[in-house]
Image: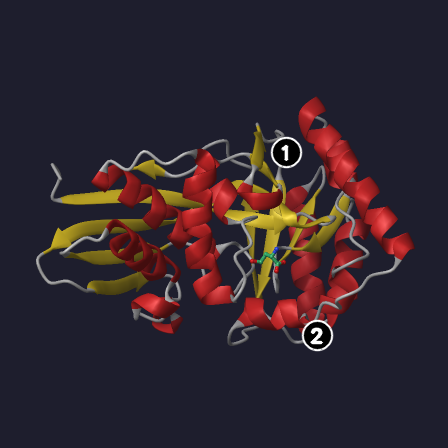
Amino acid sequence: MSVKQLAVYAPASIANLGPGFDVFGIALSELGDTVRIEAVPERGVQLSVIGAGSESIPIDAESNSAGAVVKHVKETQGLDYGFSVEIEKGVPPGMGLGSSGASAAAAAYALCEYLGLDLSQKEIIRLAAVGEAAVTGSPHADNVSPSLLGGFCIVGPDYEVVRLDPPDVEMVVVMPDVHYENKTRLARSLIPEKVGLREAVFNVGGTARMTAAVALGDPVLFGRSIQDRLIEPHRADMIPNFWGVKQAALDAGAYGCSIAGGGPSLFAVGPEPEEIGDAMAEAFEESGIESETMLTRPSGLGARVV
Ligand code: HSE
């Protein structure tokens, strides 16, 4: 170890992007988490969390996504010392913007740099997914992959991830003032085990079109591919006035609009993102829900030392 403390930033992300449940994720240019790690003689993992929503984030290593990553590395590497880990939250937790994934990705990247671990892309994604699993109960990699690699990521079996440069497109995210405990677990529990063939075919078409849109750099096709008949109908009830907010986005000219990750935020793509965001916020307000609007773009940058 040649450095005393190392800080790594990892960006927020939007998973699923409509059709690609647990498969697609894209890194965002706004918001990210910074994880600072330092080796300490005491053997445990000491966590502290500051920043957005930090009061709701557990600081025991087992149930914190960054802490679980550090604990896993400590155990698998047989280290006889511990770590002090500070997590500075820029990604608000429980909003569907890959908050636990950003912390896990930053921690995994930081440890690799700090300890000089020469992990392959697959191995570092698998490591970050250990952190995601600690919080959400599922080791899905559609948030940790873009938080690590940046860009538009397609998650395949066994953490084989294809990364493409993201499309040059403006996005709007509207975050309602709606909070659930263990939100991702809840959102995942709403999805049925089996889905209909017609709906599956519809989503397969959407994933193909979205991949083509990214490869072709076509923002309109990208936006039009934001459609989901597999997951959205089952999660809609988690979000007050979901269908009204989505319709407001489409009426304001959005090419497409869906749930960001496990929700409750919605995201949309269209030519006038500010107007679309205002219309969505208004629709939330009609049902008595305050919200915050963020204009953003995909980012090609993933985790990096800062
Ligand atoms: N693909 C995940 C889900 C993202 O929709 O449950 C949330 O972390």
State the separation of the CA atoms marked 2 and 1: 30 Å
Residue 272: x and y in percent read 69, 40
**Residue beneath label 1, please?**
169
Going by the picture, which residue comes out furthest to the right? 198
Residue 212: x and y in percent read 74, 29
**Residue 286 found in image quarter:** bottom right
Residue 5: x and y in percent read 16, 45
Q: Is residue 30 left or right of residue 275?
A: left
Identify the residue shown where x is 55% and y is 75%. 180
Q: Is residue 92 left or right of residue 261?
A: left
Viewport quadrant of the N terminus: top left
Tag 2 secondary structure: loop
Identify the residue shown where x is 8% and y is 58%. 41
Identify the residue shown where x is 39% and y is 39%. 303
In this rendering, does residue 199 appear at all?
yes
Viewport quadrant of the C terminus: top left
Q: Is residue 276 above or below residue 265?
A: above
Upstream in sequence: badge 2 or badge 1:
1
Residue 120: x and y in percent read 41, 34
Q: Is residue 292 above or below residue 128?
A: below
In this rendering, does residue 306 appear at all?
no
Is the CB–ligand 1 distance for label 1 below 8 Å? no
**Residue beneath label 2, please?**
287
- Which mark is in front, 2 or 1? 1
**Residue 45 found in image quarter:** bottom left
Q: Nearer the viewer, residue 148 or 122?
A: 122
